[in-house]
Image (cartoon, helix red, strand yellow):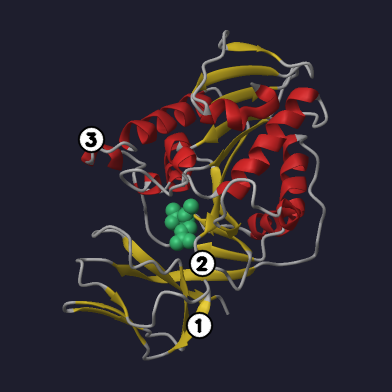
Amino acid sequence: MLDDFLHFTLRNETPEQAAGAAPSGVRWRWLGQGMLELTPPHQVDAHMVLSAGVHGDETAPIEILRDLVTDIANGTLPLAVRVLVLFGNAPAMSAGKRYLDDDLNRLFSGAHRELPQSAESPRAAALEHAVAAFFDEAAGARWHLDLHTAIRPSVFERFALLPHRDAAYGEAVFEWLAALDISAVLNHRERSNTFTYFSSSQHNALAATLELGKVMPFGMNDLTRFTKVADGLRLMLAASPLPATGAKPRIFDVVGQLDKHSERFVLVVGSQMANFTAYPKGTLIASDGDYQYAVTHEEERIVFPNPKVKVGLRAGLMVVERG
Ligand SMILES: O=C(O)CCC(=O)N[C@@H](CCC(=O)O)C(=O)O
Ligand SMILES: [Zn+2]
């Protein structure tokens, strides 16, 4: 199972034993499809949730996590933190789709209870439960990195989104993300139903969504584009310091959200632009009956434009760079 946790998960297999020890001495516990806890044989003071495949067609990060698990199991990667590896939506991964019924990353913090019939709702509940149980036993640092890829190309190939929290994120967080080869960071300024908002708000984890390149089918990713991110994750898992890069990511604040109120929703500027495309003040971005979104800052950039989302969901974010 540990040598290829991805295929084990996609085949929906159940291990003969639910727990054991790898050749490296790392103890493992299988917690259900796509859910694996790995604990080093010695005392740790950091606990890390690493998730990918919350959107089933975002495969590069899934392949990165698969390789990390293999290397932890065979001892190539000396694990020194406790880690919970989660493949979010295995049925959607098998189908090569973002989701089957509903976007899993809009169902956390209990939102799944509003959609009891959805294929994704029990999964959101199970993931919440796994994360809660993992952090319940956690004394020390708590991290959650939820790895995604974007549908559109991006001015910044690798960027992060930080969930809203009351306390501002300090410089150390931006330095840490720069060391993970992240060149732009978005600060959410509102609560949401994403996985990272759940871990941050309910479990006090330092949580970030990382966007690593573009959606591709399994086997089609050029993982060399993410070597620095993967190496950074390896250092974190080995509890080794990340290299000081001296680089600073560009920082953006979310200043608006494009809401799809009805099927009349139109992205007036089109939907084929790259993430972080800039528009000047006054540009009409979207309309939906009486609802209109026009740029009110000197310049706003669009991120995740997607008019095809379900009614009621966000069809894009508008961001402004911090001065
Ligand atoms: O490219 C897109 O349109 C979506 C990429 C993606 O899945 N992004 C995440 C971001 C989560 C966040 O806002 O923190 C999502 O939309 O769920
Ligand atoms: Zn995603």
Quarter of the image holding residue 44? Answer: top right
Mark identifier at residue 116: 3
Quarter in which the N terminus is drawn = top right
Q: Quadrant of residue 233?
A: top right
Sequence-wise first label, 3 or 1: 3
Disc nearer the start of the sequence (2/1): 2
Residue drawn at 71 percent across, 51 percent down: 223
Label 2 element class: loop
Tell me whether circle 2 and circle 1 mark residues in contact (CB < 8 Å). no
Residue under the point 64% across and 18% down: 28
Q: Is mark 3 within 8 Å of ligand 1?
A: no
Note whether ligand 1 is within 8 Å of mark 2.
Answer: yes
Q: CA distance from mark 2 to mark 3?
A: 30 Å
With respect to residue 87, does 164 lie above or below? Answer: below
Where's residue 266, x and y in %?
28, 76
Name the residue that disc number 2 marks.
Answer: 152
Sequence-earlier tag: 2 or 3: 3
How far apart are labels 3 and 1 at the CA level?
39 Å
**Compared with residue 41, is residue 228 higher up or lower down, i.e. above or below?**
below
Amino acid type, label 3: Pro
Residue 207 in the image: state x and y as whole percent. 54, 46
Q: Position of residue 148 (x, y in %)?
A: 54, 51
Q: Nearer the viewer, residue 196 or 67?
A: 67
Question: Going 64% across and 55% down the picture, which residue do you hit?
Answer: 173
Query: How many marks overall?
Result: 3
Q: Which residue is mark 1?
A: 278
Query: Where in the figure is residue 5, as x and y percent of width and height?
Result: 62, 28
Residue at 29% across, 39% down:
112
Q: Is residue 188 visible?
A: no
